[in-house]
Image (spheres, coloured by chain):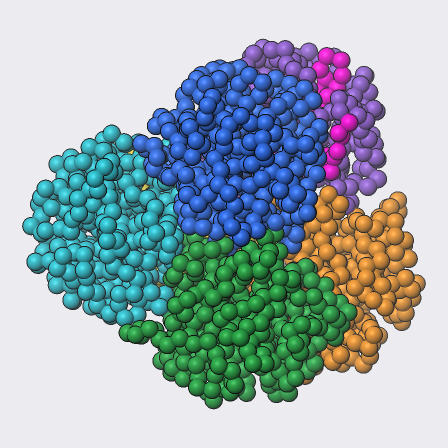
Chain colours: A orange, B purple, C blue, D yellow, E cyan, F green
Amino acid sequence: MLSKNRIPWQEKPEGSKDVMWRYSENPIIGRYETATSNSIFNSAVVPYEDGFAGVFRCDNKSVQMNIHAGFSEDGIHWNIEDDPIVMKEGNTSMIDSDYKYDPRVTFIEDRYWVTWCNGYHGPTIGIAYTFDFKEFFQCENAFLPFNRNGVLFPEKINGKYCMLSRPSDNGHTAFGNIHLSYSPDMKYWGEHRSVLKVTAFEDSAWQCLKVGAGGVPIKTHEGWLMFYHGVIKTCSGFRYSMGAALLDLEQPDKVLYRSQPYLLAPAVDYEQNGDVPNVIFPCASLHDEEGKVTVYYGAADSVVGIAFGRIPEIIEWLKNNSI
Amino acid sequence: MLSKNRIPWQEKPEGSKDVMWRYSENPIIGRYETATSNSIFNSAVVPYEDGFAGVFRCDNKSVQMNIHAGFSEDGIHWNIEDDPIVMKEGNTSMIDSDYKYDPRVTFIEDRYWVTWCNGYHGPTIGIAYTFDFKEFFQCENAFLPFNRNGVLFPEKINGKYCMLSRPSDNGHTAFGNIHLSYSPDMKYWGEHRSVLKVTAFEDSAWQCLKVGAGGVPIKTHEGWLMFYHGVIKTCSGFRYSMGAALLDLEQPDKVLYRSQPYLLAPAVDYEQNGDVPNVIFPCASLHDEEGKVTVYYGAADSVVGIAFGRIPEIIEWLKNNSI
Amino acid sequence: MLSKNRIPWQEKPEGSKDVMWRYSENPIIGRYETATSNSIFNSAVVPYEDGFAGVFRCDNKSVQMNIHAGFSEDGIHWNIEDDPIVMKEGNTSMIDSDYKYDPRVTFIEDRYWVTWCNGYHGPTIGIAYTFDFKEFFQCENAFLPFNRNGVLFPEKINGKYCMLSRPSDNGHTAFGNIHLSYSPDMKYWGEHRSVLKVTAFEDSAWQCLKVGAGGVPIKTHEGWLMFYHGVIKTCSGFRYSMGAALLDLEQPDKVLYRSQPYLLAPAVDYEQNGDVPNVIFPCASLHDEEGKVTVYYGAADSVVGIAFGRIPEIIEWLKNNSI
Amino acid sequence: MLSKNRIPWQEKPEGSKDVMWRYSENPIIGRYETATSNSIFNSAVVPYEDGFAGVFRCDNKSVQMNIHAGFSEDGIHWNIEDDPIVMKEGNTSMIDSDYKYDPRVTFIEDRYWVTWCNGYHGPTIGIAYTFDFKEFFQCENAFLPFNRNGVLFPEKINGKYCMLSRPSDNGHTAFGNIHLSYSPDMKYWGEHRSVLKVTAFEDSAWQCLKVGAGGVPIKTHEGWLMFYHGVIKTCSGFRYSMGAALLDLEQPDKVLYRSQPYLLAPAVDYEQNGDVPNVIFPCASLHDEEGKVTVYYGAADSVVGIAFGRIPEIIEWLKNNSI
Amino acid sequence: MLSKNRIPWQEKPEGSKDVMWRYSENPIIGRYETATSNSIFNSAVVPYEDGFAGVFRCDNKSVQMNIHAGFSEDGIHWNIEDDPIVMKEGNTSMIDSDYKYDPRVTFIEDRYWVTWCNGYHGPTIGIAYTFDFKEFFQCENAFLPFNRNGVLFPEKINGKYCMLSRPSDNGHTAFGNIHLSYSPDMKYWGEHRSVLKVTAFEDSAWQCLKVGAGGVPIKTHEGWLMFYHGVIKTCSGFRYSMGAALLDLEQPDKVLYRSQPYLLAPAVDYEQNGDVPNVIFPCASLHDEEGKVTVYYGAADSVVGIAFGRIPEIIEWLKNNSI
Amino acid sequence: MLSKNRIPWQEKPEGSKDVMWRYSENPIIGRYETATSNSIFNSAVVPYEDGFAGVFRCDNKSVQMNIHAGFSEDGIHWNIEDDPIVMKEGNTSMIDSDYKYDPRVTFIEDRYWVTWCNGYHGPTIGIAYTFDFKEFFQCENAFLPFNRNGVLFPEKINGKYCMLSRPSDNGHTAFGNIHLSYSPDMKYWGEHRSVLKVTAFEDSAWQCLKVGAGGVPIKTHEGWLMFYHGVIKTCSGFRYSMGAALLDLEQPDKVLYRSQPYLLAPAVDYEQNGDVPNVIFPCASLHDEEGKVTVYYGAADSVVGIAFGRIPEIIEWLKNNSI
């Protein structure tokens, strides 16, 4: 739980009993902040040099989906490139991509790995690495289509890379459980395990239709802390909220605790109104050595917001509110 | 049309030609007013002692649905119990319940009867009685699943208890007509009759997909005044509005008048934004001896609002706007 | 298990290991055996005087659904009335009926009770009684719509009439579990209980979409023997097969055993071809004092077939093949 | 590109790089501006005498759809008739109409022609003419059902009337391409040609589900400028945006350019909230001799907004952003 | 009702009470009777010279749909061209066609007109004429997509060509009513009228989902005799049967009688088994001066069968069995 | 193309112009040939010792799906084990399996590899090996769910195992294209490539909904010969036919030829009638050094049939009928 960076932070509002709370200046990134963007949301950030770097989902005004690099000194104000990332060849020459969206970023060993939903005969998980957020090297897709929400653990587990993902179909997928897969080399993947499934409607309705991993899991003494999104289908469409789970450190397909209540659900204007109303979709988080954590989430498929919490408190809450 | 209580009231805004109008301080109950609530909406109130009591639908942050008791002096400011109602055995020992939602309350003879949508192998109509809103005694479910919106008349008709309901299916029911059933004993139900059906799209589109009874019908010289919800399906989901009907006093499956226009449809922020946008869902009303009536309705499946009207004016309007 | 009638019978084919087997001369009733019929299927028979009487589902060539009385000396060759049954008023004057289909018949105390799927603002359970299969007296519908497959037990249980049914919706219902309800008087119904639900796909796929009661349950020393239909959805539509369950004598919502394998599934020409291919739909059975049982079933929604078995052997098989 | 009228206008906000921009006082017509209206939206205006006239879609509070005449001096403040247009017989005595919605108006030769979605055994294209917006003469429907968004060119092409339309089905149509048809006499129609189809999701997602003509095409030296709506299906329903295309002057089924990005997509309160959230639906435009153009569009199926642009700039943008 | 041709004929089977009866040697055309055919069905025949000519739907083994010419001496044994019809330009140069199926043929004045379902940006009605069934001249499509089952009357009515059709959508259309349109010139069409709609399920279920015209209407003293198909949706898919209607001679959108029962429904092997089970689809008929009529129909989307009747008897039956 | 076995064979019927033809004694395996089977179909066979061995899909009478070993001397008469295969641990201890169906078998290097659709939190591709068809060792699943129709090439390509598969969803999958993946070790899989996609409806309708690999590809001098199934959706459900493709020897994701017409489509009784009508589903083939090939296919999800052809003739036909 070490971090040399000063992360964005705002104290809990007085009187609040919430475990996590929104930034009062949300959204931190508006929909039109690049030259051609229709919306900027579901995006990933990491500490980088003295500040922060990130990979951002920017849909342009043709509503084509792509990912852009960006930099920030404080994690709140961002300079996002007007042009999408241009991929070079990594461990393969086959770097086809009909579209790219919903990126995640993690640092492993010597480089930053980016994963995203990559359009290759349907959505699957694209992988690339970068050392500097300027040059990116695209690798083999991790899986066959159809898949979304591929998230790497920030270190090898049992000597292998380890990725969470959510097998999907080719449309507005109406199901979704979190699985985990291993790779010795970031090229071939196997040892697929089921991790987290949707709940019964009676037990926890906000996550009864689908669940998918959020940002890179955070290593704690008690386990991997994973934020995730859960979905319910109302008579007006899907509603996305955010929960958390604690996964076993050695055997991360083993769920130690998993939130019955949500941590954050759409309730304010920028989450309720946008291209897709009622969406909170976490894709990244920053944390420091004191246990403070700042979660970045896409709101209403239009803008980026952040929310704050303290890891020990979240874990305590998880233990008391586990399903 | 007698009531000894002073009901919540606000005069019609100047210049308004509406038959019913919203309270300017709506919503009167916010979504987070109990310790664990995600939303408080579709709820029922009655005069009780010197003030008011009610049964409230509170979905918690796991989005589990349950009903809570509450008390108020003025009908506007409410103290709602943090814990859901715990049922004791009424006329049966079978009081299973996977979930409870959308309560209604009425006083008959010597006690308050609560009905709600009860989860027993799917949604059906649960029944309980209370004398004091502290102890509640759950009885046999009225019907086989699947059913919703069970509403009792406030007195026996032809010597029998009489309940409105809306047969449903086990999901986001895409149909719905109001029926009526009788019971000699609150245990066995029969003599099922059709009351009010959806309209043709061309005639009154807001109520062309489904209709369901709102609060307890109000006895007037001209008939039972029933507020009800009507639903239209747009390309963005269901939209719930409120209308009214006048039912025959002796033979309440006979509809005397029925509103072609709606009385109230979602048009302000708290009705258009929430967990399910564009929902007005009446579950109760209070009225006094002057004919003033205050309707309580759930807004956007998130909060509670109230609206006002005068019964004679509503009936007059019904006669002139009946389909 | 007493019966004074000689029931239709044919011994098990040599070498067969099946618990139940088809009549070699099936179908016993063809589709065109009344003056106007398009199909005759899902029908009910009982011992009557020196032979048998029955109520038959005859869809006419307008594919209007109705029920007709019929008589037989041997249970195999039937004289079915060309005209549908005309109902007189039983315990009510409200005997509306848009259509009638899938009848069952049972003798209780002093008369024959007929139940069927009755069209009253959607499908629900119609009830009538007759003493002679000439005059029929229609009673109040048992339930609100939507319901199908209402089947009465052949005697009162705990002093009350007892009916199995399958709550449904208003189309080609894609779900269905068997419930049970009681009535003191054949007019008001309550004490609704869940009896038998669909199975998990992995456990017994032929009954994973819906299940519904077949003929009148047979009283045995070990419990009520109930034949039922189970449905699976293939990529070419629904497929109906037949299984059996043993219900507790005193508390018939308690399932003692329930068949994991089917007893009979569509596999011969008249079950695989017809207005709705791949349907076996039992509606009645006859049995004698030796334990021989003859099940009548609709085949492919077009004709009537029979199948044979021995009750002790069926029960033994049930115990060994229960899920 | 001649117009003697002073059209409503507001300069582009400083610093804006948008090709089209909204009026700061939008919406110009609210939902309750007639005596009985629930909403006023998707409507058409033309220069008329010294000011403007129009035909407005006003859904009343029964949510019955009809079209009303209206007049304005400045194109922004409108007097809309409380009563819907009453049609007289034009070229036929068969002027049945279950409902009328989404009108367009154009002046050809000596009169104003109105087209709209007319309910005649399903939605089809109604036609009427007027000289004064007081008397309207209804003609034969142009096509068989099911059709919507019929838009006439403002002059004969190759000696024949020419109409754009979008073949549809009888519900919330999930497909839609723009076609074109000719008529020698406004009674019989033929020579049907495909004009503009939906795009591939990867190329321009905002218009990948359906496209339909907006207002009357504007004649320019470079071709017919047609504003149109495009639709994407999100997991919360349909989202309507506005683009433009340039059609060949002589052979208008030939598309010269067609916008890959949208020109305007729902992003402000009155477009995101209403009876159907996230809808921008253009039905008319005014332009002057300088090339200024003012587009009238329905917002959220509730109110009317306007947006501004300059035709030369729009055409230049089209050439640079064509798919 | 004049015909100089000897039509195929077989007397009614002894004892039969049916109004129409099948040919005992059905199917008359098997599925593999051209070099590449997968199936030959829904096809049209007319008297031609001393025998008969026809246009046949032959799907090849790629299941591409096309129409082929054929000749016969007796109307039963056919020589069908191995190659599909090659169209020349008729009244237009736009003779695009993605596919052709379900042809009808009629002689008007001086030539044979063929109509069929033509693939032009979706299914619509193609038109061509021929003098000799060797050269065919394709004309403008009659309507915008989506349409199927276009059938011309065999003479002008009120001086105009007159066509029945069934507006559809772009898939397995789940609705369908028969309309009628007029044309002065076989190029432009208008005066669209509703003719025959689906029935209520309770009234005549076999035709409650869709209805579409069969072969060319036959002129009788009492009106135009039109055979048509009706469709019901079972839980195993669509089932197509055949009925008849009598239309007013002068005003053919006026239905004089219309069959409540079907005339023929799938009940024999070649109708119940094939590429689409349970389909009877009439596309043509022959009749002679005695009133004998022979209907040609596609069976199970695989082969061609014929059925016989006598026109006076059919009309008499229609009068007695009209809905 | 070497084979030391005498394969089942029957010459082409005289006069037939078909490229492949059915065995006159089909089906070779009936539905009840094990003690508990409901159906035996979609199964795989290989040469083994002096005869043949196979793995068979046997659904039992609970309609639970499992795979059974079997042996045969002539490839036509089979002894199939009554009990399903019991798996031992292969390269993993995680050998969970909710169900097993649709097996394929191929010999690579030193052992027989079995792949099948394995139930692990949804359908995915199970892998096992055996040396003797008595002991089977289950390995890691190849992919994340959801996948079906995993088929191994019979030798390593470019030093790696190579598998075809069809990504799916968790129900009656309505889409399906063939992909290809590589593995260095039968444990980790990557380098996923698209191989064969569905066709446009107009080009080849029998394969326009989904395509999936059939049996193990056959190595020929011209490429890998792959039989595959193609699916069309009719208004009565899915219809499965068989085609063939020729894949590049070195780079097998490259399609050299691919059949526009089908090779075999359901047309005889045992293919048209069964648990799922109109299904031909190839899972294996045998061939000899002369180029004779015998394809094993499941028919109507009920029984096993075989069909014959000659490889050179099939390849010649492919070249002339490629899309």
Residue D227 percent coordinates (x, y)? 44, 58
Q: How many marks?
A: 0
Q: For the point 53% across and 63% down, which residue is it?
A: F41
Residue B231 percent coordinates (x, y)? 55, 36
On screen, residue F190 versus residue E193, left or right, reads right
D315 relative to F171, above or below = below
Residue B146 appears in which quarter of the rendering? top right
The N terminus of chain B sits in image quarter: top right
Q: For the point 21% across and 57% down, which residue is it?
A: E114
Membership of B113 in magenta stretch = yes
B139 relative to D192, above or below = above
Instruction: Identify which residue, C34 or A259, lies in the foreground.
Output: C34
C107 relative to E78, above or below = above
Instruction: Identify which residue, F137 or D274, lies in the foreground.
Output: F137
Looking at the image, the residue that sits furthest to the bottom is F221
Residue F82 percent coordinates (x, y)? 62, 62
Membership of A128 in magenta stretch = no
Residue F223 percent coordinates (x, y)? 48, 85
Residue B94 in sight from this viewpoint: yes
Residue C250 appears in which quarter of the rendering? top right
Residue C187 in sight from this viewpoint: no
Q: Which residues are magenta?
A: B93-116
On screen, residue E76 versus residue A130, left or right, reads left
On screen, residue D170 versus residue E197, left or right, reads right
Instruction: Identify which residue, C160 or F190, lies in the foreground.
Output: C160
Instruction: Identify which residue, E116 or C182, lies in the foreground.
Output: C182
Q: For the point 70% across and 38% down, which residue is it?
A: C256
Residue E265 appears in which quarter of the rendering? top left
The kind of secondary structure the magenta stretch mainly shows is: strand
Q: For the point 37% across and 29% down, which residue is it?
A: C79
